[in-house]
Amino acid sequence: MNARQHAASEELAKNMHATNQYGDFFGISQETFDHVWSQLTDPDGNSVAYISMEIGADPDVYSPIRGKLQKEADLELADQTELEFIDKFLHGPQKIPNYSGGLGILAGDTLKSYADCRLPVVAISLLYRKGYFAQYVDSQLGQISQNVEWQPESTPSLYLLKDPDGSGRPLQIDIPFFNEYDHETIASAHVWMKMEVSNSLDFFVPEILLDYCLPKTPSLIRSAASQLYNAESSEIKAIQRRMLGTGILPALRALGFCPKTFHLNEQHGVVLAIQLIADELTAMLKHDRLEAATDEQILQAARIAAEHLVYTIHTPVKAGHDRFTKALYSGISQNSCHRILDILAHDDENPHSYNFTNLAMHVNRSANSVSRLHRDVTHRQFPQFAHKISAITNGVHHLTWISEARAEIFDTTPQLTNWRHNPGVFAKAGELANDQEFKKRLQLAWQHDTHALIDSVNEMLLLHRNQMTETWIDPPNYLSTLIGDNVRLQPDVFTVGFARRFSTYKRADLIFNDIEQLCRISVAHNWPINFIFAGKAHPADEPGKTVIKRIIDLQEVLYRSSNGLIKLIFIPNYDMKIAKLLVAGVHSWLNCPKRPLEASGTSGMKAAMNGVPNISIMDGWWVEGYHDGATGWKFGHEGPIDSASLSESREELLYFEDSSEFYLLLPLILQSFYDKSKENVFLDKGVKNLLLNIPIFNTHRMAAEYLQRYELALPDGQAQEMREFAELYSSDN
Ligand SMILES: *Cc1c(COP(=O)(O)O)cnc(C)c1O
């Protein structure tokens, strides 16, 4: 090794390797690591703990460390420890299946922006050894769910923290639980850390993941710990919530972190509030026989605890609001906890249940909904708390979701200089709307991404076909069973994407309500269409699984009735990677929830960031992102929120009304796509999405709005930068 090489190697070691009493970490410098750690452990400091049941941040979609290694790592120069890290980052498994859908991905995107904006935040969630579930789809059986097998040990960016006692053993925290006789027992957890590293590798947000699946863990707790949203029984569900909520303070203490604010991303972790109240009561009474507290003392303690809590509510759908029967909760709690719940979590509709959304609504200093429309719905649902609920509209992490082909254009467009750091630059680049050169390049990038999507779908069809003889799974796509070139997808065909969780209110099959009419539109003008669908239904959600089966069953009839013009594809096992391929590759993104049940929706924002227009019901974020049609199309019922039904029963889902409007709209869209004289419609809407929607629906802007709730003091320069992000948009107008 010559002197220059030696210096380079030392440089790598210095800049990409950090160590402390909890372990060895890779990707950022010791200086950065120590800086973040000292901010989070400063007893006089001010930091935030972000609590979420799920976090979605797969490294195969976004990993600044891997990006840097791919460009710069010189393997010959690295020492043994670094080589192992580099090998793991470049070749290790790139999935962390700790998410089920939008809530988790929002959490991941949020934390990435917090890291980019250098905000002192630590996140806490659980580590699920069996993930959510892996989805297989069989043309006869529909959705089949399997456990995910994954190895946190070999996944880059995940670290099992060591006990700082120097023994080399994993750090273990012991969390008080209560068995069915209300006797105290202990549940132990190991502590993992995922580092959400900033784009320029100069900051990180630690995600603390509690792993309760230890050899001695009792089996009931193990079931609750190993699978996200395990709904085998309400008891397991309640234990899962408790594992998250009760684990927060012990985990933070074990690491010396001392946040002043706790942000509950949905109410799943709200058991934390009970614990904060109990701590206040103990201090107030100067003993821990909390049964002796009066109601007024409990309310007083709750007011003090509330000063530490910020709460985001994510859905108007009742199934998203945890309710547990009182009997069930007594089985895994303690008496004083009952007193607190009786006062703060009562459920008007059901006196025998505790309602955890009510608890979270009671105990916070600030609550928010995730779009303007959702704020209005939430006010209607919780009139007694309306005065403290405002809107912070969701966003997505622009660096995660903008395709490489699009990013390359932005990188070389002078008006967009610094877009990676500041997604607000698009707001000032209005002249690009008339820049033919820019539009031409955008069109080429779009075509490139469409080709990538179509190729990957065609490969999948072939793969499933070849697997037919090897597995017992019947290919989920009718087209896999046909042979010939014309049964493959073509990239110049109008391609519509739809992918999200399959829950009833999202109405994935809405546009297939009248197959004949749909086929007539296509056949009359010889307009071919590709519909590409993906998404999982919760394994216990029978209606959701039925909709998946229906999509599969419709493929053949659509194909035949349209003379092969309409191809409906289902991609199994939806994840972030498939999402990214889809949102960048399609020509339009479809969203058809029953208004007003989609609180926000984020996949449409991912499409918008790539300049892909949405075709959507006026629900959630689209009310704010539609800009009078500049960015896409709307259809469906748009009545006032005050009288809108929140029911998911079939009669109230408006299939007929909303699909009829879709059939009126579709020919106009197809004509814009296929009629050469209208060629500019898509490209114009594409550019308008970049200019109007990137500045709003990014998580940097969202971080700036949350920052105002966190009451975090930042150094002047950083505070100014966050103010600029905040000025991009006011969600609560
Ligand atoms: C973005 C995303 C979602 C959420 O999509 P919605 O439109 O909010 O329903 C769910 N799953 C995956 C894999 C995603 O990438």
Image: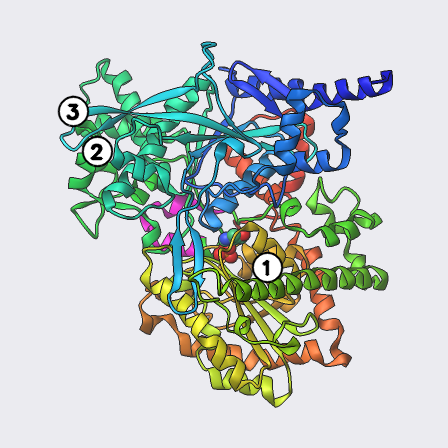
Question: Disc number at residue 721?
Answer: none
Three-letter code, disc 1: Gly
Q: Position of residue 715 (x, y in %)?
A: 65, 24
Residue 450 visible to the viewer: yes
Q: Which residue is mark 2?
A: 332
Q: Residue at x 83, y 61 (%)?
A: 435
What's the coloring here?
rainbow
Determine the residue located farthest toward the left in the rendered image. 181
Left/right placement of residue 531 relative to residue 436 reads left
Sequence-earlier tag: 2 or 3:
3
Front of the two marks 2 and 3? 2
Residue at x 53%, y 63% (from the top left corner)? 464
**Which stretch did the figure color magenta?**
375-391
Disc 3 is placed on an element classified as helix
Counting residues from the N terminus, which is met first, the one under dot 2 or under dot 1?
A: 2
> Which image quadrant: the N terminus?
top right
Residue situated in front as seen by the camera: 533 or 316: 533
Where residue 471 sits, quadrant-wise, is bottom left
Q: Point out the tag, 1 or 3, that comes first from the N-terminus.
A: 3
Q: Are marks 2 and 1 in contact (CB under 8 Å)?
A: no
**Gap in angstroms between the C-alphas marked 2 and 3:** 17 Å
Q: Dot 1 corresponds to which residue?
A: 625
- Vertical comparison of 165 with 45: above or below: above
Q: Residues within 10 Å of mark 2 (few under 14, many from 20)?
A: many
Q: Residues within 10 Å of mark 1 (few under 14, many from 20)?
A: many
Q: Residues within 10 Å of mark 3 (few under 14, many from 20)?
A: few
Please say whether residue 389 is one of the residues in the magenta stretch: yes
| Residue type (three-letter) at the residue carrying disc 3 | Glu
Relative placement, left or right, of 82 versus 212 is right
Main secondary-structure element of the magenta-colored stretch: helix
